[in-house]
Amino acid sequence: MASASWLKFIDVDESRAALVRSALHDAGVVFDEASHDPGAVVAFLVVTRVTDGLLGFLRDQGDPPGQGKGARPMIVIAAPGVELASDAHWQLLHAGAADVLSWNDESGDEGTAAMLKARAERIDEVDRLCQSDLVRKNLIGQSPRFLACLRLVIETAAFSNAPILLTGETGTGKELIARLVHTLDRRHDKRDLVTLDCTTVTPELSGSEFFGHEKGAFTGAAGTREGAFALAHEGTLFLDEVGELPLRLQAELLRVVQEQSFKKVGSNNWQESRFRLVCATHRDLRRDESEGRFRKDFYFRIAHSICRLPSLDERRADILPLATHFLRTFRPDCEPRFDDAVAEVLVRRAYPGNVRELRQLVGRIAHRHVGKGPITVGALPIEERLAPGSRPDGWCDDRFIAAIDRALSFGAPLKEIGRAAEDAAVRLAVDAADGNLQIAARQLGVSDRALQLRKAQRSAQTDA
């Protein structure tokens, strides 16, 4: 049985609400409408129409008042007898809904209530894994994009044996995610994780690296060697930077990836290798494939499930939690806290090297810090210190322009675009400051009071 689901009705009359409550109860769904139980891992929103308030609620990740951040999965359900326009489905998904469906109480055991129960149970199990010590102590972050990526990885790893392709910029933690996939794999006879860095594979020795070789197979082959495929039998094979493989080698790997059988160099015997495949790359393989630098048939064999790890710039709310985690690692004797001025530097700074670069910066700060108290500005390396009144340049880049262009293509008027930009700026600043309104207000260039009033007004609009 899943943990209690959070049930909320928006503009739904009591007769329809009663029908939904009754059907959910009969299907065995445990739900809560009043206390906002923090154990609830999925929210069901039953609606009759799509409003700005509903979209804003979803963009804020649907946290009930007083529950803090959480990015709880939210399923939007059109109330009985209500049909949402097709465009409304995409609006809701874009705003953050996990799924959108219409209530159908005439389809027996496969009805809406039964579907919701099954989905709640799956989401519940994925969330339990997401909140487990195994994950939380190794993969730090609660930002919506990171949690969405993490849930996808966890669900694929625990409930399938599908090949996974991890994409994203350098330093985003792809190897950590690969290790998580191997750990969560539920094969009872699972063996080792074997990692092969494709950037180190030379064309001359590639066959031996992957397939192994027999004694005397080539000059210098003084003995038999097991390759990566043999070593990964009954385990997991992680091909890091798979986008660096030359086309010829991609062709050679097609059969073993699909059929899981191969021959050693110098052997006539087929050998079986049952392995789970996880690949990672910082490259855009679809673009490489369209330009002839990556084989289409190989791409579709390795990309059954694709997860793009967000850059640190896309998950700035995780900067301070990550920095605190790294500080504990470097200085377990130190109070894991940054003064507001130091926190502001960490939040405002750009990180081209992503999480890896943040870790290096915190290491430099930790090594300069003296004593057991909180980290103060004196521990910052000189080149990291902000000049009075400084602000970063280049923020209005191509990505910002592309976002405005996308809004215009959807027919959004100027006033709506401006309001959405302001809402996003407030949300991102507060998240990046880990809820500290003073830091967020300074970053936004407004007073603490103005920010408090704005958030209170937004909460009142959502409740209404």
Image: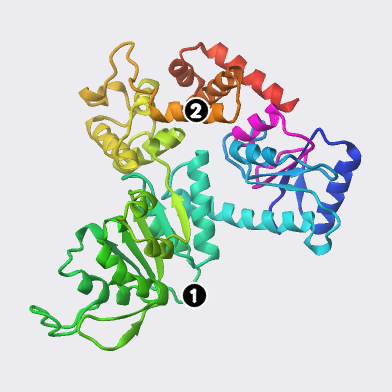
Q: Is residue 451 visible?
A: yes
Is residue 37 within the magenta segment?
yes
Q: Secondary structure at mark 2?
A: helix
Percent of width and height locating residue 260: 39, 77
Q: Amino acid at mark 2?
A: Asp
Q: Is residue 185 magenta?
A: no
- Tag of residue 188: 1
Q: Residue at x 31, y 32 (%)?
A: 372
Asked where in the image residue 80 lies, by quadrant, the reply is: top right
Q: Nearer the viewer, residue 133 or 461?
A: 461
Quarter of the image where the N terminus is located: bottom right
Write down the region rendered in magenta: 33-62
Q: Earlier in the sequence, mark 1 or mark 2?
A: 1
**In the rendered view, does 86 fall on the left or right side of 315?**
right
Q: Residue 441's spot in the image, x, y percent? A: 48, 17
Give the side of residue 183 with respect to residue 295, left or right.
Answer: right
Viewport quadrant of the C terminus: top right
Quadrant hosting residue 280: bottom left
Residue type indicated by callout 1: His
* Residue 138 x %, y %: 41, 50
Residue under pointer 2 = 405
- Whether 35 is drawn above or below 267: the answer is above
Residue 324 seen by the camera: no
Label 1 element class? loop
